[in-house]
Image (cartoon, grey):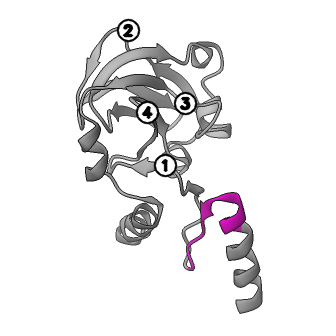
Amino acid sequence: MAARFLWASRVASHLRISVAQRGFASVVLKDLKYAESHEWVKIDGNKATFGITDHAQDHLGDVVYVELPDLGRSVSQGESFGAVESVKATSDINSPVSGKVVEVNEVLGETPGLVNTSPYEEGWIIKVELSDAGEVEKLMDSDKYSKFCEEEDAKH
């Protein structure tokens, strides 16, 4: 068992994902930052791309609709800008950072299930121009987010 986990850890490191030793099975990419409300953000200069995490989509179940904001709208860290509706529930999407919406993933209107099948790539939700790059420091890295999810799942 230990040899299997060591092998999995090495593969995960190569793929830049985090693997927890206990029951946490969601994919957590190392080069992203994470909010406690289960959104991820990828920073590229003064722009940020974000969506919901693999952990969030797993708990939501099959996504059937994604409410997207209008282009040019201002979003604030921690505040709702849209919603994800699944067969189980509807959940707000909170902005992990503040900025102005410069792009929305229009493909989600036709194929909302991309949030389930590819939450970190094809299932991204919006891109913003950052208004306060310092807010990123308030977010969790992959290791902290993995631990946060483990602890949260243990409570339920």
Range of the magenta residues?
12-21
Q: CA distance from mark 4 to mark 1?
A: 14 Å
Structural crowding at the residue carrying mark 4, measured as other residues with C-alpha within 10 Å and reported as few (<14), some (14–19) or many (≥20): few
Q: Which amino acid type corresponds to the residue marked 4 in the rendered image? A: Gly
Structural crowding at the residue carrying mark 2, measured as other residues with C-alpha within 10 Å and reported as few (<14), some (14–19) or many (≥20): some
Number of the front mark, 2 or 1: 1
Please give the residue where the numbered disc 4 appears in the rendered image: 45
Question: Along the polypeptide, which appears first: circle 2 or circle 1?
Answer: 1
Question: Along the polypeptide, which appears first: circle 4 or circle 3?
Answer: 4
Question: Along the polypeptide, which appears first: circle 2 or circle 3?
Answer: 2
Q: Residue at x 42, y 50 (%)?
A: 33
Q: Which mark is residue 154?
A: none
- Residue 83, image x, y percentages: 39, 26
Please give the residue where the numbered disc 1 appears in the rendered image: 32
Please give the residue where the numbered disc 2 appears in the rendered image: 70
Q: CA distance from mark 2 to mark 1?
A: 24 Å
